[in-house]
């Protein structure tokens, strides 16, 4: 019985580890988001700063936050790509200028895939 219990618990442990390794960790993402905070708020109905508010951004139309003056380059990308999803967000956060060459988001990007995964989990958590 004890052996069975130990096996059971270790399987649960391994599964949760695999899950968190794949899905990204919103809590860790909140920390990484400190790098974005100078320019972005993420509270619901929050104001745009130097960059647009990022509430509900995953799945949202690109460059469509009310009252923000986007560069024509991001607007052109929006025509072509439509919405933000995990794939194009990953590219954007990795190196914005690789996705939209002349964007006015002056940010070098996050090199570590884990940081990007976590930040995307955090963005997803801040949505409805
Ligand atoms: C120095 C200021 C600055 C920093 C730092 C910054 N951004 Fe931005 N961000 C901007 C600006 C400005 C835009 C609008 C770009 C344009 O119009 O070309 C933008 C646009 C975006 C968009 C597109 C929003 C939309 O409405 O389509 C996302 C997503 C985004 N930023 C995420 C991030 C994340 C995540 C970080 C941190 C890893 C970050 N940004 C760091 C200034 C910044």
Image: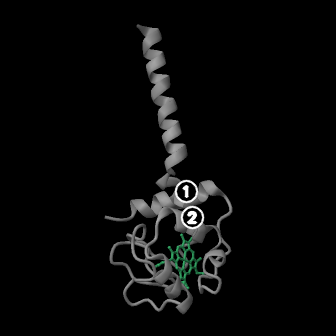
Q: Residues within 10 Å of mark 2 (few under 14, many from 20)?
A: many
Residue at horizontal 59 percent and vertical 82 percent from the top: 105
Quadrant of the image containing the C terminus: bottom left
Residue at horizontal 55 percent and vertical 56 percent from the top: 117
Quadrant of the image containing the N terminus: top left
Looking at the rendered image, the disc whose residue lies closer to the viewer, 2 or 1, is: 2
Q: Position of residue 7 (x, y in %)?
A: 48, 17
Mark 1 residue element: helix
Mark 2 = which residue? Answer: 90
- Tell me how far mark 2 sits from mark 1, CA to CA: 8 Å
Residue at horizontal 56 percent and vertical 67 percent from the top: 34
Report whether residue 102 is seen.
yes
Say whether disc 2 or disc 1 marks the residue closer to the N-terminus: 2
Report whether residue 50 is seen.
no
Q: Quadrant of residue 2?
A: top left
Mark 1 = which residue? Answer: 117
Asked whether 10 or 38 is in front, the reply is 10
Residue at horizontal 34 percent and vertical 73 percent from the top: 44
């Amino acid at each position: 019985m004890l052996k069975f219990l130990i096996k059971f618990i270790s399987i649960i442990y391994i599964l949760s580890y695999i899950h968190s390794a794949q899905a990204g960790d919103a809590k860790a993402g909140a920390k990484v988001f400190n790098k974005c905070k100078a320019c972005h708020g993420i509270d619901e109905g929050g104001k745009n700063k130097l960059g647009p508010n990022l509430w509900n951004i995953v799945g949202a139309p690109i460059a469509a936050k009310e009252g923000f003056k986007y560069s024509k380059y991001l607007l052109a990308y929006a025509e072509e790509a439509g919405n933000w999803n995990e794939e194009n967000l990953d590219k954007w956060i990795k190196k914005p200028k690789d996705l939209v060459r002349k964007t006015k988001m002056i940010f070098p990007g996050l090199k570590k895939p884990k940081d990007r995964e976590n930040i995307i989990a955090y963005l997803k958590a801040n949505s409805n």
